[in-house]
Image (cartoon, grey):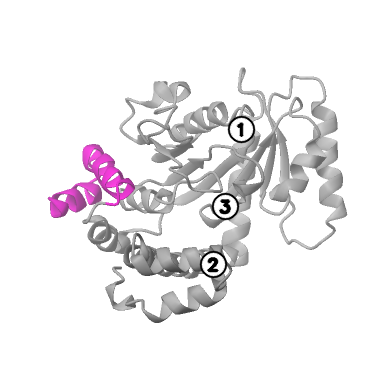
Amino acid sequence: MYDKVIEGVLNKDRRMVARAISLIENNDNGRTKILSEIYPHTGNAYVIGITGAPGAGKSSLVDCLLSTLRQQGLSVGVIAVDPTSPFTGGAILGDRIRMQEHALDKEVFIRSMGTRGSLGGLSRATKEAVQVLDAAGKDVIIIETVGVGQSEVDIIKYADTTIVVLTPAGGDSVQTIKAGIMEIADIFIVNKSDLPGADRTASEISMMLDLGGSLREWRPSIVRTITLDGSGITDMHKAIFEHRDFLENSGHLQKVRKERIRRDIIDLIEYRIKSTVWEQISGSEEFDLLTNQIMSRETDPYTAAAQILTGINLDKCKV
């Protein structure tokens, strides 16, 4: 079965691409085989991350950007990371009502993924879904995050270009920028710019960038958009590819992707070790005994952790 899925992904079969992502999300036993065999065919797609507070208009911006990219003849994948349903574990919003006009386009693949308890507004399987879409020949992959505030900075681990969406009606934009967002944005979008306060929001972002001085080689662009009539979408598209040109010409793109690979390896090691440790101690009498001893202050968590680690068999780690 897995060989058929792998072959289908490499042949750009939409059903097999969807199947591969489902197997990865569900942590199927064949997940590692699929990812390992498609990996040599990855590394060609450009990844754009779009983040911001709920209600900022991220989905509408993605929809407009999709139209622009398709007019250029580019094949596009979209991963929309949604809140997780407490009942089914799936994505609450489904495959994005706002993007339905692209659903029948064979060169557009849209997939909603639940966060499934992951912090940072992203599912743990997001980067692996990106690899599937990359191997399936997508030129551009857009990741739209769930929008959860300060922990949203995780998007920088996945995207080549990170777009932060703000709105004039979003309250104090300086507070928003202070929430770790300033450091991750390559492009700021002031969406719903027909609302009062758009000029102020853009000015506040510019002032914050000025305060940062010349610490960064790339000064983030500030683009004003109105998705209702498409205003500013061309400017957003231009800013994205200006940033891409900067990354490629300066050599930063290779550095960013190399660092991403290093981080992926470390994340995989951490995940495997955590899973192995939990499998061996969950429900064990020793773990319950140590927990009770800590409660009664007969021992401490640090000594208990060291004692547990001495008995862990890391040979059972499955990669």
Residue that label 1 marks: 234
Q: Is residue 236 magenta?
A: no
Q: What is the distance, in whole Å, between disc 3 and disc 2 at their CAs?
A: 34 Å
Instruction: Considering the whole magenta stretch, tell me its main secondary structure.
Output: helix
Q: Quadrant of the C terminus?
A: bottom left
First of labels 3, 2 by sequence position = 3
Q: Is residue 133 visible?
A: yes
- Where in the figure is residue 100, as x and y percent of width and height? 40, 22
Dot 3: few (<14), some (14–19), or many (≥20) neighbours within 10 Å? some
Q: What residue is drawn where x is 18% and y is 52%?
A: 7
Q: What residue sits 81% from the left and 20% below the top?
A: 196
Magenta extent: 1-27
| Three-letter amino acid code at the position of disc 3 | Asp
Disc 1 from disc 2: Cα separation: 60 Å
Amino acid tagged 2: Ile
Give the residue number, with chain letter if any, for mark 2: 294
Q: Cβ–Cβ below 8 Å for labels 3 and 2?
A: no
Earlier in the chain: of badge 3 and badge 1, it is 3
Residue 154's tag is: 3
Looking at the image, residue 275 sits to the left or right of residue 244; the answer is left
Give left or right: position of 264 versus 161.
left
Instruction: Residue 26: give x, y in percent of width and height.
Output: 30, 46
Q: Earlier in the sequence, mark 1 or mark 2?
A: 1
How busy is the neighbourhood of tag 1: few (under 14 within 10 Å), some, or many (20 plus)? some
Find numbered disc 2 in the image and state the secondary structure of the residue it sits on: helix
Residue 51 pos. (x, y %): 60, 40
| Magenta span includes 21 | yes
